[in-house]
Amino acid sequence: MQSTAELEAFAPFQNLSATGLASLRRGLQYAHCAKTTTLLHKGQQVSGAYIVLRGQLRVFTLTPNGNEATLYLINPGETCVLALNCIFNDLLYPAWVQASSATKVAIIPGTSYRLLFESEAAIRGITVQAFSTLVFRLMTELEGMHTFKLEQRLANFLLLHASTDGTVRMTQQQIASHLGTSREVIARPLRQLVAQRYIETKRHHILLKSPAKLVEVVRGTREASVPANSAGGKRSRPRR
């Protein structure tokens, strides 16, 4: 039997009954994933429920032009909703799952998870929370895709993923993959943000120089800038 000590560090699993804990231990497996390791492939049969213990998983799909587009991220204590859907409805996995960093995952066999769902309120709570969280995240992303320009989506992404010191520890290619586009496409708005001194690009990370200005970009309240090479390099004069 596998120890459930790491799982029990998360509140919902602390409320399992003795019978539930015994059922959880039976067949419980752990997966250690190095950064960029692909844990699940599209069309793969899902073996169980995936609970992130440490690190982070990224669930993504491919756009028609072959670019990666992030669907959602799975943080410590969270589970993969698409995997749950697969084990409850006997479906193949519809996307790809990759480790964003060194990640440890607990895998609860599908049969065990379904039995726990029926008998343990804590497991039902985890499942409902996972689905509601996903709906909220997907609605937020869809709203951004339909209402935001690329520059606004980029600024919003940088604000959401910056650490407390204002650093986004991702390459431009990784950021482009999250936004469902290519590095070449986001290069122009990145250059504009650098020229305006809102951000500073470094090797493998981006530093936010003016988060408040990025908020203005997201809100669309920033004064529009005129590229130096537009209109023959001349700036339009204000009307008197």
Image (cartoon, rainbow, N blue to C red):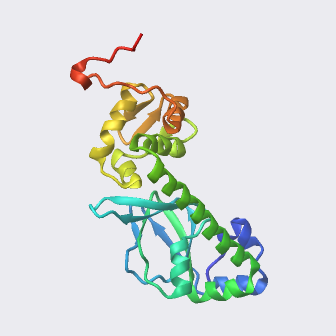
- Looking at the image, residue 48 lies above or below residue 35: below
> Which image quarter is the N terminus in?
bottom right
Total numbered labels placed on residues in the image? 0
Q: Position of residue 161 (x, y in %)?
A: 51, 46
The residue that appears at 55% across and 30% down in the rendered structure is 212
Q: Position of residue 151 (x, y in %)?
A: 41, 40
> Which residue is outermost to the left?
232
Q: Nearer the viewer, residue 51 or 160?
A: 160
Q: Nearer the viewer, residue 7 or 87?
A: 87
Q: Position of residue 214 (x, y in %)?
A: 50, 34
Q: Is residue 78 left or right of residue 16?
A: left
The residue that appears at 42% across and 27% down in the rendered structure is 224
> Which residue is outermost to the front?
240
Q: Nearer the viewer, residue 90 or 14?
A: 90
> Which image quarter is the C terminus in?
top left
- Looking at the image, residue 132 lies above or below residue 218: below
The residue that appears at 52% across and 66% down in the rendered structure is 104
- Looking at the image, residue 124 lies above or below residue 160: below
Displayed quadrant of residue 186: top left
From where the camera sits, is residue 42 visible? Answer: yes
Q: Is residue 12 left or right of residue 219?
A: right
- Looking at the image, residue 228 lies above or below residue 151: above
> Which residue is outermost to the top?
240
Displayed quadrant of residue 193: top left
From where the camera sits, is residue 5 visible? Answer: no
The residue that appears at 36% across and 26% down in the rendered structure is 195
Q: Position of residue 69 (x, y in %)?
A: 39, 59
